Amino acid sequence: MVAGKREQWRPVVGFEGLYQVSDRGRVRSFHRDPEGELLNPMLNRGGYPYVSLYRDGEQYTRTVHRTVLEAWRGPRPEGHHAAHWDGNKTNNRVSNLRWATLADNVADQVRHGVHREARKTACPRGHKYSGSNLRITFDGRRACRACHREYARRRRAELADA
């Protein structure tokens, strides 16, 4: 978004005439105020902001990032999820969001340093995951060459004794 640019609004998909979502990731309701009343999002267990929307006497819970994407980028493509370029779950500006595959989301986690496996710097025995000690397994996991060599040595010894 260009500095000084006015906030732009679009109808929330499925709630046209009742709610709007902005390019800045804000949601407003037209239930009580014809000018629109800003909703105050809550955070779900995963840390993503969500809002409760009402239509025909029923309540619907919607995450803000998905609501923004549907209004500004169209329906979710098959096999895609909402993704934040900067990794900040609360930055729901349309410029920070995109539809992405699960693989794209995992790559983002690695890039942002929050992927559980990518944060590990050493194996459970304390050997560093670096240089010649780092081995990538067939399924993409990191493994320790020193531990693998020790396991192979013990296995050969067991087989020789049998």
Image (tube, rainbow, N blue to C red):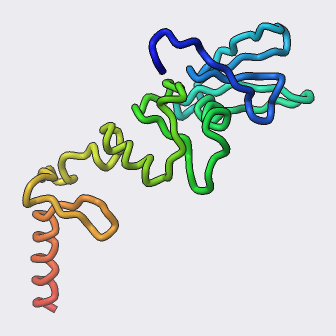
12 up-or-down from 140: above or below: above
Residue at image point 72% right, 22% down = 20
Return the residue found at the far right: 56
Which quadrant would residue 61 be assigned to in this image?
top right
The foreground one among 130 and 96 is 96
146 up-or-down from 5: above or below: below
Describe residue 29's horizontal placement relative to residue 82 as left or right. right
Picture coordinates of residue 49 (x, y %)?
Answer: 58, 26
Picture coordinates of residue 66 (x, y %)?
Answer: 62, 36
Residue at image point 35% right, 39% down = 114
Return the residue found at the far left: 132
The foreground one among 61 and 22 is 22
Q: Quadrant of the C terminus?
A: bottom left
Picture coordinates of residue 63 (x, y %)?
Answer: 63, 32
57 up-or-down from 66: above or below: above
Number of numbered labels in the structure image: 0
Using the rendered image of the protein, determine whether residue 67 is visible from the camera's viewpoint.
Answer: yes
Which quadrant would residue 13 be assigned to in this image?
top right
